[in-house]
Image (cartoon, rainbow, N blue to C red):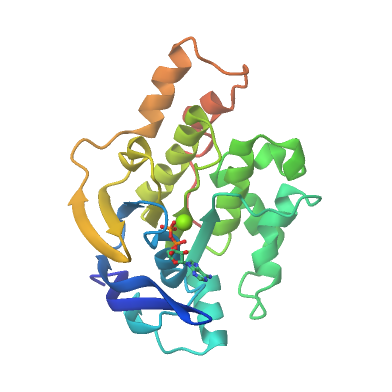
């Protein structure tokens, strides 16, 4: 398969009473399997709207969307939800975890909502997903007992539990300090090394340097598309941070992550 994502002339209009907001004005985007794309652009330029369409959370007003070779632009709501559950993992800026619910249960949730019950052992799958993000030992903790970085790792594990081929992350580091942001980028780079296609919205140029390609949106259109020449390695950056004197609170989870709690993991 040449393209995992292929859009032609995607538009999305919101009708607000008399006013028509044209959030997407004709987006042509193709993404190959294994790419890591950072989507940048000013607030209001249509980044989240594009991610929601690509993630089958929202349907375009017009245009064509071919996902893994299948035209999904005209599917029914149910078929749409089905594809979203099977093929796509979503990560949000605000984590969107259930508060008084353990990490394990949060990660298991998408499987319990899957009426087809494709995964025989939801519990085992959730544990495996938490292992992939280096959090297995914290699985019985609730989000309010975790740091921001840990919460986002739980959210990434939840995105992984269905074994998706694509992960869409909308400003996943937007609520995190810079060290924790790099930690999250190391998780995403590791997943990308395992051939998961990643699209990441960020407004931080430093964060975009961890991707392989940067596209820029303006007023609902793609206005720039270029490879990242001097790509950064988040693991290397964490190592050099760990050696410096700015260890924030003495937590050693960064070292744990770099030290390979994820490195031996393979996809189920
Ligand atoms: P970004 O993520 O780049 O900040 P968005 O995709 O959220 O941009 O928004 C693009 C445009 O669409 C903005 O003008 C925004 O106000 C508008 N918009 C987004 N979602 C809605 C909605 N649900 N209803 C009406 N307008 C919306
Ligand atoms: Mg947004």
Task: Determine whether 150 is above or below 40 in the image.
Answer: above
**Residue at image point 40% right, 30% down:** 235
- Regarding residue 253, the answer to whether it shows in the image is yes
Give percent across and percent down for residue 85.
55, 72
Residue lying furthest right: 100
Give percent across and percent down for residue 178.
47, 30
**Residue at image point 33% right, 42% down:** 208
* Residue closest to the eye, 48 or 125: 48
Give percent across and percent down for residue 59.
46, 79
Residue 110: quarter of image: bottom right
- Regarding residue 121, the answer to whether it shows in the image is no
Residue lying furthest front: 18
8 relative to 72 in the view: left or right? left
113 relative to 53 in the view: left or right? right
* Residue closest to the eye, 138 or 10: 10
Task: Determine whether 203 is above or below 236 in the image.
Answer: below
Which corner quadrant holds the N terminus?
bottom left
**Residue at image point 62% right, 21% down:** 251
Task: Determine whether 180 is above or below 228 in the image.
Answer: above
Task: Determine whether 113 is above or below 44 in the image.
Answer: below
Give percent across and percent down for residue 167.
45, 58
Q: How many marks?
A: 0
């Amino acid at each position: 398969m040449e393209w995992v994502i292929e859009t032609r002339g995607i538009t999305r209009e919101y009708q607000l009473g008399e006013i028509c907001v044209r959030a997407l004005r004709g987006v042509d985007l193709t993404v190959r399997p294994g790419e890591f794309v950072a989507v940048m652009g000013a607030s209001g330029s249509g980044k989240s709207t594009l991610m929601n369409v690509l993630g089958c959370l929202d349907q375009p007003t017009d245009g064509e969307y071919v996902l893994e070779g299948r035209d999904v632009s005209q599917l029914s709501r149910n078929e749409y939800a089905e594809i979203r559950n099977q093929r796509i993992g979503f990560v949000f800026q605000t984590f969107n975890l259930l508060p008084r619910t353990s990490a394990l249960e949060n990660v298991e949730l998408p499987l319990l909502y899957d009426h087809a019950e494709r995964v025989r052992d939801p519990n085992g799958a959730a544990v495996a997903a938490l292992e992939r993000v280096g959090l297995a030992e914290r699985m019985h903790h609730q989000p309010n007992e975790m740091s921001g970085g840990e919460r986002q790792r739980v959210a990434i594990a939840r995105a992984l539990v269905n074994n998706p081929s694509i992960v869409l992350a909308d400003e996943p580091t937007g609520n995190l300090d810079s060290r924790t942001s790099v930690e999250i980028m190391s998780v995403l780079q590791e997943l990308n090394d395992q051939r998961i296609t990643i699209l990441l919205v960020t407004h931080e140029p430093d964060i975009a340097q961890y991707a392989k390609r940067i596209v820029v949106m303006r007023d609902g259109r793609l206005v720039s598309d270029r490879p990242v020449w001097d790509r950064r390695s988040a693991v290397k950056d964490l190592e050099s941070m760990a050696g410096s004197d700015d260890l924030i609170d003495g937590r050693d989870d960064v070292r744990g992550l770099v030290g390979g709690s994820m490195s031996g993991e393979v996809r189920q």
